[in-house]
Image (cartoon, rainbow, N blue to C red):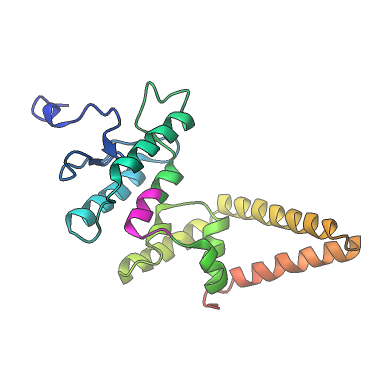
Amino acid sequence: TNEYLSPLLPEHKGEVFKHVFYIDDPSLAFCGFARPTIGSLPMVSEMQARLIANVFADKINLPIDMGKMHTKDVSNNKEYFKDTSQRLNYLVNTYHYNDELAELMGMKPNVWKLLFTNPYWCFHLMVNPWTHFHYTLFDKNERYRSTAEKMIEKIAAGPEAAKLRLCAYACFVAVIIALLIFYKLPQKDTLVSSLLLAYSFQDLYSKKNVVL
C-alpha cells in the first residue's frame, strides 16, 4: 500500500461491515479486501462492487443495525475460521458471503419459490455448479438476465456439471427410497415409485419454458 493510501485504510480489525463499508463512515467503502477460502477473488469483488454501486446510487440502503450485524458476523467468523481467524480476519466462505451480499441487494434467488413456479431454473440452481450468474438470473436488466441464462446453461453442459447432477439425482433417489421404506411400502413399489419421481423431476428440469 502506498504512503498516501495507508492513512485512509482502517486496521482491518472488524470495523468494516461485510468487509466493504467502514461503519463509522459508510461513505468510505473497500472492494477486494475479502479473501475467499474457495473460488476466485474477482467473483467476490464483483459482488462487493455491485453493493457499493447500489448504495452510492441510493438504490438500496445499508441496514440500520449494521453495527449489531457486524458484531454477529465477527463472532460467527471467529468460530467458523477458529484455526485461522486470528491470523487472517478477512477470510470468507465464498458461497455464504456472496449470498449475504446478494440478500442486501435483493438479488438472491428464492429456490423454494422457484420449485413451484419455475422448476427448470430451480433445478439448474440446485444441481449444477454454483456461479455468480445465479444472482443476475432474474435481474430487471434484460441483457444481464440473458447473459446469466446463457452462461448457466453453458456451464451445465460441461462434463463436471454432468457428474454433479448424477450425484444429486442419486442422493435424491436414495432419500426417496429411505422415506418410502420408512412408510413400509413393498420393496418393488418403493423402487418403481422413486424412479418415477426422479424421472418426473428430470422431465420438468429439461423443459425450460415450464412455469407453474
Q: Is residue 103 magenta?
A: yes
Q: Residue at x 88, y 60 (%)?
A: 184
Q: Quadrant of residue 92?
A: top left
Magenta region: 100-108
Nearest the viewer among 167 and 135 is 135
Q: Residue at x 33, y 65 (%)?
A: 144
72 up-or-down from 180: above or below = above
Q: Quadrant of the C terminus?
A: bottom right
Residue 177, percent from left and from top: 79, 57
Q: Quadrant of residue 126?
A: bottom right
Residue 188, percent from left and from top: 90, 63
Main SS of the magenta segment? helix
Nearest the viewer among 63 and 87 is 63
Q: Is residue 43 magenta?
A: no
Residue 35 visible in rendering? no
Residue 39 visible in rendering? yes
